């Protein structure tokens, strides 16, 4: 695993998806959050699934090389009604966790409700509330888009906030 330096902790948050995987990078130092970057890795539905998964893997590896985070946070899969899309998201999540671990990052996993609780203060918060709190907490003039990237930034914020509760993280 990567060793943490003194100073800001760079955290990457990831919101897995087969069609669109969001990522967001923040620095956290002395209880202060600072926005670094965000984006998404998009795949085309007409491509074979294996090719889409490889594209996600390569995309997140590129992001890791550019931003060099020391920690990661990934949203856990929640059960959806559409089993076909849930399977694709699960596969994308597996590829992402593998890439994060391969890079040497501890992979911290958070449920959607835990992320909402850490960011908004309410586990049942609406998506727009989470997006607005991400904007406010990171002192942005815009709500990060696409939605998956805003969710990824929320995951990173959750990791920063929960680390305050657990010594040694």
Image (spheres, rainbow, N blue to C red):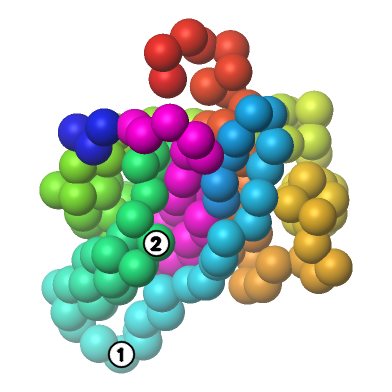
Taking depth in this image into account, of 43 and 134 the one nearest to the observer is 134
Res. 53 visible in picture: no
The magenta region covers 4-25
Q: Which residue is located at x 67 percent, y 72 percent? A: 145
Q: Which residue is located at x 51 percent, y 55 percent? A: 25
Badge 1 local density, few (<14 within 10 Å), some, or many (20+)? few
Identify whether 159 is placed above or below 140.
above
Q: Nearer the viewer, mark 1 or mark 2?
A: 2
Direction from residue 99 to residue 163 in the image, left or right? right
Name the residue beneath numbered marker 1.
46
Q: Which residue is located at x 46 percent, y 45 percent? A: 10
Q: Considering only order in the chain, which callout, 2 or 1, is on the residue closer to the N terminus?
A: 1
Identify whether 140 is placed above or below 107.
below
Direction from residue 65 to residue 130 in the image, left or right? right
Q: Which residue is located at x 56 percent, y 46 percent? A: 27
Res. 117 visible in picture: yes
Locate residue 4, reporting x and y percent.
34, 32
Q: In which quarter of the image is residue 117?
A: top right
Name the residue beneath numbered marker 2.
67
Is 22 included in the stretch rendered in magenta?
Answer: yes
Identify whether 106 is placed above or below 127.
above
């Amino acid at each position: 695993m990567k060793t943490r330096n003194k100073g800001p902790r760079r955290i990457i948050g990831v919101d897995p998806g087969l069609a669109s995987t969001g990522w967001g990078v923040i620095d956290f130092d002395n209880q202060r959050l600072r926005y670094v970057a965000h984006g998404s890795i998009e795949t085309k539905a007409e491509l074979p699934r294996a090719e889409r998964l490889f594209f996600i893997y390569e995309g997140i590896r590129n992001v890791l090389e550019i931003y060099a985070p020391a920690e990661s946070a990934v949203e856990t899969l929640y059960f959806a009604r559409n089993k076909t899309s849930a399977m694709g998201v699960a596969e994308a999540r597996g590829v992402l966790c593998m890439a994060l671990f391969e890079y040497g990052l501890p992979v911290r996993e958070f449920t959607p409700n835990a992320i909402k609780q850490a960011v908004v203060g309410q586990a049942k918060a609406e998506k727009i509330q989470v997006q607005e709190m991400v904007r406010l907490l990171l002192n942005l003039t815009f709500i990060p888009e696409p939605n998956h990237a805003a969710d990824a930034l929320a995951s990173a914020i959750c990791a920063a906030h929960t680390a305050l509760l657990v010594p040694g993280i």
